[in-house]
Image (tube, rainbow, N blue to C red):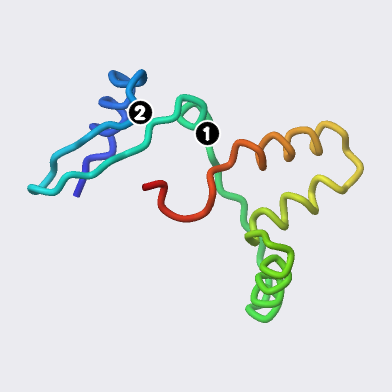
Amino acid sequence: MIDEALVYELCAKSIIQNHVRLVADSHISTIDVKYKQMSRKIVSMQIRVTESVRERAKKVAKAHGATLSELVLKLLANTGDKELKKLVEKELKERPKPGRPW
């Protein structure tokens, strides 16, 4: 298991490089370093819904070619608040694609 604090320390020291290579338990892992993503703080937002609502929302998001999180963000952007719309557009633009980066 890779120590997360060690990863951040190495990333900070190697910000110019494209990749940071770590050796842990005789396995080599590659971690992409992107300065913009490191400076963003991501928090969790939750809503309580029934399982059927969640599953249907996932299907709708997939039909629109988006993840459930992206669908919710797009709906938030359409509330009429200009600042929220601007923030959501920026978030969607900077957001990494789903899945592992390597």
- Nearest the viewer among 58 and 81 is 58
What residue sits right under mark 1 in the picture?
41
- Judged left or right of residue 82, residue 98 is left
Q: Secondary structure at mark 2?
A: loop
- How crowded pointer 1 is (Cα within 10 Å; few <14, some 14-19, many 20+) is rated as few
Is 29 or 24 nearer to us in this picture? 29
Q: Earlier in the sequence, mark 2 or mark 1?
A: 2
Q: Residue at x 27, y 34 (%)?
A: 7
Q: Amino acid at mark 1?
A: Lys
Give residue 82's mark: none
Residue at image coords 52%, 54%: 98
Label 2 crowd (10 A; few <14 / some 14-19 / many >=20) = few
Q: Is residue 48 left or right of residue 85?
A: left
The residue lying toward the viewer, choosing from 24 and 97, is 97
Of marks 2 and 1, the one in the foreground: 2
Q: CA distance from mark 2 to mark 1?
A: 21 Å
Q: Residue at x 22, y 35 (%)?
A: 21
> Which amino acid type is marked by label 2?
Asn
Q: In this picture, is 39 found above or below 101?
A: above
In the displayed image of the protein, which residue is found farthest to the left? 26
Image quadrant in which you'd find residue 87: top right
Q: Residue furthest right?
A: 80
Q: Are marks 2 and 1 in contact (CB under 8 Å)?
A: no
Q: Quadrant of residue 54?
A: bottom right
Depicted 55 relative to depicted 90: above or below: below
At 74% from the left and 38% from the top, the residue drawn is: 89
Mark 1 element type: loop
Provide residue 101's location: percent of width, then percent of height. 41, 47
Please count the marks in the image: 2
Query: Which of the labelled discs sits on residue 18, or is there none?
Result: 2
Comparing 51 with 12, the one in front is: 12
Q: Position of residue 27 (x, y in %)?
A: 13, 49
